[in-house]
Amino acid sequence: MVSLYSEKMLNIICNDSLEEKIVCMFKKYGVSGYTILTARGEGSSGHISDMSGFDANIMVKVILPESRMQVILESIERKIKKGYHLTIYITNVEVISPEKFEKTIS
Amino acid sequence: MNLSSLLLPAVLFFALGVIARLIKSDLKFPPDLAKVLSIYLLMAIGLHGGYELAKADMAIAFQSIIWALILGFTLPIVGYLALVATRKVSPLDAAAISAHYGSVSAGTFLTAIAYLDNLSIQYETYPLIMLAVMESPAIVVGLLLAAKARHTLAAREGGGNLAGKSGEKSDLKDMLRDAFTNGSVVVLIGSMIIGAIAAPSGMESLKPFIDEIFMGVLCLFLFDMGMVAARRIGDFKQVGIVLAAFGVVMPLVGGAVGVYIGASMLDFSVGGSMLVGVLGASASYIAVPPAMRLAIPEANPSFYLTLSLGITFPFNVIIGIPLYHSMAKAMVP
């Protein structure tokens, strides 16, 4: 039976204009990698559609050990206080190769 | 007003896009189509304009740039003061909205060119440089107005810090770089330079790309934009009647000022003056929204997107352009 290891997954939904800022934050505080998907939906910022390509949302997913989560959350909190619209949630995930999430990209 | 302007294929396709959305048709364009088409349109108009400008009078080109800067820097301030006076939006929302009105909409400008071509009216190519120049200054003014609004709000709240000072400074530097290197500006100015320096024989081979398919692509672009705009019209209730009125009055003011500058300051023909009017009247929906999301995150994007895309853009395409034409006819001696 394959062993499973617990990790945290941080999910961010925001406008695509914030992508550069978020990637920059990941590189500053250290993550092993991230995945970005285009997203659309409706919420406090009104209807966001990727239809025209002028105003799209993204969903950013990053898996990281719990010990490294706090510093990133603090940075996100500072951005939210500045007024940036970011929807954040954290989920518990299980991975088969935890070492993959230890090494950081720069 | 000339009714034939409304029967322009490009404008009719815009209306079709709006109708398709209103009747809830399942018609859907591939994602990013409008973005792709706008790159083509800017490239084609840039190549064409650059080729013409190489033969133009540099003194008038220089004057056009100065007037474009004046328009780009002053229109957002006028808009900001008007919006703050309505007391319907916060100063930060006012800063973000007015930045859109100082910048320009290439889609509206190209529709105006289609309108002039349709009526066989001659126009100068200088407004094209003004289009490129006017993309960015309003973003800078928007940032400055927002900085001022933040200081006022912070003072009112007893020194509450809305954004870190040092962070604000480095952000401002990044914003300024982004404002002047944004995609539309690079495509437009780059294509104009290529159009100006490329060998004429090479330009000849590009003719089908620049001229022959241009109007068809514009129709497709406006078809898509009609659907995008119609989606925004649904948010009309959210912005309220006063803001919606701003979306119509501001282009009229900007349009009148623009036509006046074209006719009296730059001595352009009716066609050229009308194009300057369109520059003054139009509100950006490509370059400015992402810049404002980054620079003024406190502002509500629904306000500026609904105003520029859902109200001002359709207003200019359908009513504004023929109206600025009439203004130009009245003002050009």
Image (spheres, coloured by chain):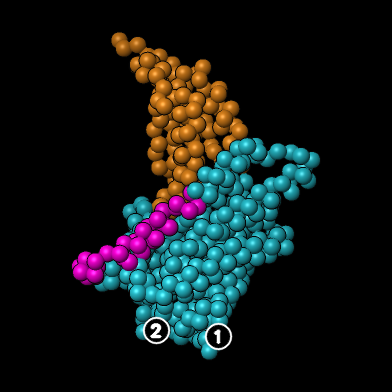
Chain colours: A orange, B cyan
Chain name for mark 2: B
Q: Residue B122's image quarter?
A: bottom left
> Element type at marker 1?
helix
Q: In the image, which disc is placed on residue B43? A: none
Closer to the camera in the image, B332 or B161: B332
* Residue B85 visible in rendering: yes
Q: Residue B111's image quarter?
A: bottom left
- Which residue is label 1 attached to? B331
Q: Classify 10 Å Cα crowding around label 2: few (below 14), some (14-19), many (20 and above).
A: few
- Residue B297: x and y in percent read 59, 45
Q: Give the range drawn in magenta.
A: B178-207
The kind of residue tagged 2 is Ile
* Residue B318 visible in rendering: no
> Element type at marker 2?
loop
* Above or below for B325 versus B286: below
Give the residue drawn at x 39%, y 66%. B222
The kind of residue tagged 1 is Met
Closer to the camera in the image, A70 or B191: B191
